[in-house]
Image: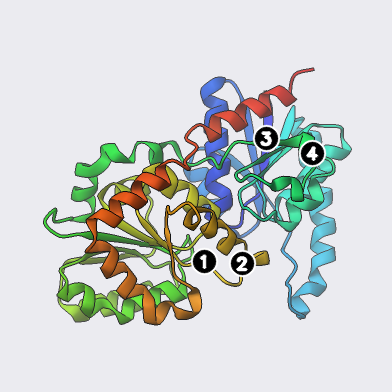
Amino acid sequence: MRIIISGGGTGGHIYPAIAIANELRAIDPATEILFVGAEGKMEMEKVPRAGYTIVGLPVVGIKRELTLANLAFPFKLGRSLLRAQQIVREFRPDAAVGVGGYASGPLLLAASLKGIPTLIQEQNSYAGLTNKVLARWAKRICVAYPGMDAFFAADKIKLTGNPVRSDIQFASQQVEAGRTLFGINSNHPTLLIIGGSQGARTLNESIEGGLKRFVDAGIQIIWQTGPAFIERAKAAVAATGTSLIKAYDFIYDMDKAYAVADSVVSRAGALSVSELCLVGRPAILVPLPTAAEDHQTKNAMSLVEHNAALLVNDRTAREELVTAALNLLANPAQQQQLSQQIKTLGKPNAARDIANEVIKLTRP
C-alpha cells in the first residue's frame, strides 16, 4: 500500500496521524507512507522524529479577524493546490488520509480529483472547517464522539475514538522510569500541568501565581509551559527554592509523565482528552475559550457530564484553578471516582480501527 497522511499545525493533529501511520505499518510493514504538512509548522519537526518522510505545502490558515495577512491566503492556497497535485501524481497513493488542520485541504482535494479514495479523521466534538469542506468527497469519516451526523453524512461515519501514541496506552508500566526521569519523590502528591504543545498562558499564569501554595502543601509539579513561557516559569520556580517543581517547555515522554501524575490540569483539546481517558488520570480541564466554535468546552463537557472530569472556566482560572487542584489532590476518594469514570470513555483500539478503514479503501 501507498498512503498519504495530511494535516497538522498542532500536536492534536500530528500525534493521531503518527498513530495511524504506526498501525498501518504494524499491519503491513511494507506500507509506504508519506506525510504532507504545512511549511514552518511543528509537523515538519515531529514527523521526521517519528521516522517518517514529510513534505510541506505553503498553505496558511485564514484569520478570523480582518488582517492584511489574509491577502496572501488565496495565493498560497493556489500554490499549495498545484504542489498537492504534483505530490499525488508522483507518489501515486492508494488512499489519502486527512487528520484536520488546513494542510489537509489541498492534498485531499487533489487526491479526490484524481479519483483516489479519501478518509478524514475528526478529533473534536465540533467538526473543523477543513473537514466539513472535505467531507463531501470523503469515502469514510472516522469520528471520536457520537452525534457527528450533525456535520457529516451518517452513512460515511465510523465511531472509532481518537488515536493516541501506543506508548500512552502502556503508561501504567512506566512508573519507575517516570520517577527516575522527572526526579519524583513518591512521598509527595504529583500534579501534571499540560497546556498543549505550545503551552497555555492562562494555565501558566494561574500556576505561577499559586506556586507558594503548592510548595506549602508539599505538592510536586511537572509543568509543561510551552516555549514562550519557559524562561519566566524557570525564574518563578527558582524563586521558590524548592526542587519539587519541574518546568519544561515540551515533554516528549508523556507516558512517563502520566505514569507518575496523581492528577492532571489540562486544556481540553481532543488529543489530551483521549489520552486522559486511556491513562485514567483524574483531571481538571480548562477549555481554551477561543477554540473554533468553542469546541474545547464541548470536549470537556463530554467528560464532565459523565462525572469523569472537573471543569474550571478560563476566565476564572487565575482565581479558582489552584484551589481546585489542591482540593482534588487532597481528596483520594474523588480522585478514584474520576479515574474510574474517565477510563470507561477510552477507546484503546482507535488507531487500529482507523487503519483498518484505510485498508478497506484500497481494496476494490
Q: Secondary structure at mark 3?
A: strand
Disc tally is 4
Q: Nearer the viewer, mark 4 or mark 1?
A: 1
Callout 2: 10 Å neighbours few (<14), some, many (20+)?
few
Q: Quadrant of the N terminus?
A: top right
104 or 92, which is in the foreground?
A: 104
277 or 253, which is in the foreground?
A: 277
* Contact, mark 2 vs mark 3 (Cβ under 8 Å): no
* Contact, mark 2 vs mark 4 (Cβ under 8 Å): no
Residue 12 versus residue 31 in the image, above or below: below
Distance of label 3 from label 4 (alpha carbons): 12 Å
Q: Which residue is mark 1?
A: 287
Three-letter code, disc 2? Ala
Three-letter code, disc 4? Ala
The first of marks 4 and 1 along the sequence is: 4
Q: Which residue is mark 3?
A: 158
**Does residue 83 appear in the picture of this structure?**
no
Distance of label 1 from label 2 (alpha carbons): 8 Å
